[in-house]
Image (spheres, rainbow, N blue to C red):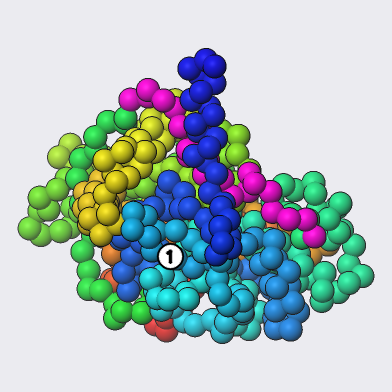
Amino acid sequence: MSRRTDHQRRNKNRASLHFNDEGGSWYALDNAAIIMPAVSSGSATYLFRISATLDAPVNLRALEAALERVARRFPYFVVQLGKGFFWHYLETARKPLRVEADGRSPCQDFDMHRKGTILMRVRARRSTIACEFSHIITDGTGGMRFLKNLLAEYFRILEPALPGLDPTALAVDPDFYDLDEPPQADEMEDSYNLHYPEGFPFPPKEAGAWHIDGIFLPEGEYRTITASIPLEACLGAARHHGVSLTEFLAAVYFEALQELWLGTRPRPRRSHLAVEIPVNMRAFLPSRTSRNFSLMVHPAIDMRLGRRELPELISTVHHQARNETTERNLKRHIARNVLGGRAAYVRLLPLGLKSFLMRSFYEYFGMGRISGELSNLGPVRMPEAIAGRIAHFDLVIAPLRAIRSGAALLSWAGELRITFSSLIAERELERRFFVRLQSLGLPVKVECNFEE
């Protein structure tokens, strides 16, 4: 057997996360998930949220029936956290997944370590169906797959005569699964381990980043401010500068951070500003997994070089992001992340000590290296038969105490939805961001989950 073939065999073996023993089905955590039980807290729940607002109030009976079917097709999501001597693991939940009443604050009142806690939940209020997922089990792509299948099944149950919702018609979109088929092995694989590039060097070390300051909201509160903007207007602004929509909005985000940094007194000790941008690795490497398969790139500026105007920020973000999002450079991140979990001295450490080291690593190399986050889930597509029944989708990133505020976006039916979510009372970051977009001629309509 050649060295390359042996390496591929080891990768494939390590990518398998589904196991059965005398206790039933259980799952290993993927490479992105293993650190999360160690760093979660009462407010930093590591839940993210994807929701759909319909054109009519939610029929709870139809939603419960749809959830029962879809949950059986995604058994690797309907799990709870187990604790072994060396690692956490995921075991099949002992209770069924039920629809819950939605509240004012998303992604809160959740403790992954509480016995029996299912690592996702489905919530409903008025005309909104929301799915909140722990990042232990999936990323935005996997979460959207679940919601899309849930919506299709919901409308099929609600109106059986609707055309275009049978498995054959839905099969044109790989995000839709045949709910009568069992889950496939590659849906629940660890694609990081599958694509581990043996011998690749690690990415360069990054500087410690400045974080915005503010007064934390009471525990259990997570404020969101959402803006809707015509998609074509935003795309036109990005095209004007020859960049992608994500790069354009990241530059506006940088400008808001820059002005906050310049207005801070005394002058902050740290001058490094970095924005984390998640990258869907399925666009670069073959993968059908519904588990995590995202990496982060961190465009950055050094404020010791002085204030930058927006065109320069756009150019900086564009070139840094394009350089980082090549297959070779992204594989360097996979090499660093996967090798840590494979090292014998790490695997043999007891879980308590391992968790302590992972918390330190995450604070220093993870949250310590970014000032904010901008996550773009991209355009959402649904079957024509039900597309007109969905007013809009929204995405809320997981709450992170270090960066305090972050933004997420997606597009639907010609509209861009940008949601800032925050654990602090101050709204200056969001205000500067949206006011800047308005100054560029973009019509911005804003709504908030808290009363003014």
Q: Which residue is mark 1?
A: 82
Q: Give the percent coordinates (x, y) of residue 38.
A: 31, 60
127 relative position to 160: left or right: left
377 relative position to 224: left or right: right
Q: Is residue 451 visible?
A: yes
Residue found at x 56% / y 61%: 22
Front residue of this view, candidates 287 and 6: 6
Look at the picture and state if 139 lies above or below 157.
Answer: above
91 in magenta: no
Residue 20, picture quadrant: bottom right
Quarter holding the N terminus is top right
Residue found at x 48% / y 53%: 28
Q: Main secondary structure of the magenta part?
A: loop
Badge 1 crowding class, 10 Å Cα cut-off, few under 14, some 14 to 19, many 20 or more, is: some
Look at the picture and state if 225 lies above or below 283.
Answer: below
Residue 415, picture quadrant: bottom right
Q: Give the percent coordinates (x, y) of residue 321.
A: 41, 35
Which residue range is magenta in the image? 180-201
